Image (cartoon, rainbow, N blue to C red):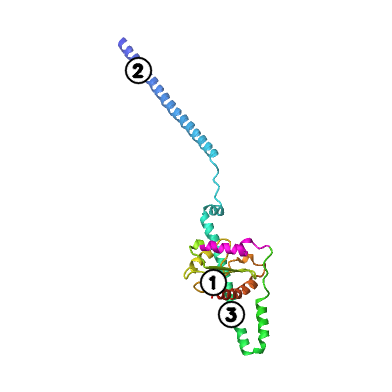
Amino acid sequence: MIEARQLTCEIGVMGKIKWLITIVVSITVVSTIWLQHEQNRELVQELEHVRQEKATLEPPQVPPNPEQAQSEIKPKKVEEMESELMRLRGAASLATRVEAENTQLRQEVERLRVQVNGSAGSASQNSDALSGYLGPTVETPANLDPAYTKDGLSAAIQLAAQKAGISLKKVGIDDSEFPFLIGVNSQPGDWEKLKAQLNGLDGYEYHGSVGDDTSHAFSIIPTRAYPAGAVQHVMRRLNVRTQQYYDSFTAQQN
């Protein structure tokens, strides 16, 4: 009887122990889960805080202005090439106008020549018509740039000859009317070398020449130095004067 009671007590004690162990294990598991949940929540909050700080420190992304980006990308070399292209287009346009003036002048001279040959009595009228077409003499500007005076042009031609590696046999300047004309006499084959330097001579413009293999007459005074509004008038007279000066310059060599 006593042994049965002891056995019953032992069973009761073991049941209580198991129950306590179960409670302790459950509490431990719940505590562990709750602790992990709190840790995860703190990590999420910390991560969000770090993201906010990063967004505050980073500068705002402003979309680039297309025009500004294009201007920054364009190299300086491209701008220089565009400037040179505009200059060459201007020179080509001027050459076209000069050629048109030359054609018109030739036609006018030929017409007057036919009239002179057909009617000797109208020579005075023809002369008046040619004078009217060419217009009055162009006076030298009072404030002419020293580079375009007789001395300045002589120095420019000598510089061009030096760059071309040639020696000029004779140089003449006609300053009887503006723009002044230049006459040169060189060795056969040297003219093309000199002309290449004239085309690139800083501050001057080569307008073409009248000449042969050794002698040429021409002007290098730029059109910007001509009297305002008189470019067409100057070019008409310049074409005739260049031919006339070439004849005079070459005659002096004979």
- The magenta stretch spans which residues? 143-161
Quarter of the image for residue 22 reads top left
Q: Residue at x 61, y 74 (%)?
A: 241
Mark 3 residue element: helix
Do callouts 2 and 3 mark residues in contact (Cβ within 8 Å)?
no
Q: Is residue 244 above or below residue 62?
A: below
Q: Residues within 10 Å of mark 1 (few under 14, many from 20)?
A: many
Which amino acid lies under the numbered mark 3 shown in the image of this protein? Arg
Report the Cα–Cα distance between label 3 and label 1. Answer: 20 Å
Q: Residue at x 59, y 83 (%)?
A: 110
Q: Residue at x 60, y 78 (%)?
A: 105
Which amino acid lies under the numbered mark 2 shown in the image of this protein? Met
Which residue matches tag 1?
A: 216
Q: Which is more foreground, mark 2 or mark 3? A: 3
| Residue 158 placement (x, y as % from top left) | 54, 63
Is tag 3's residue or tag 1's residue first in the polypeptide sequence? 3
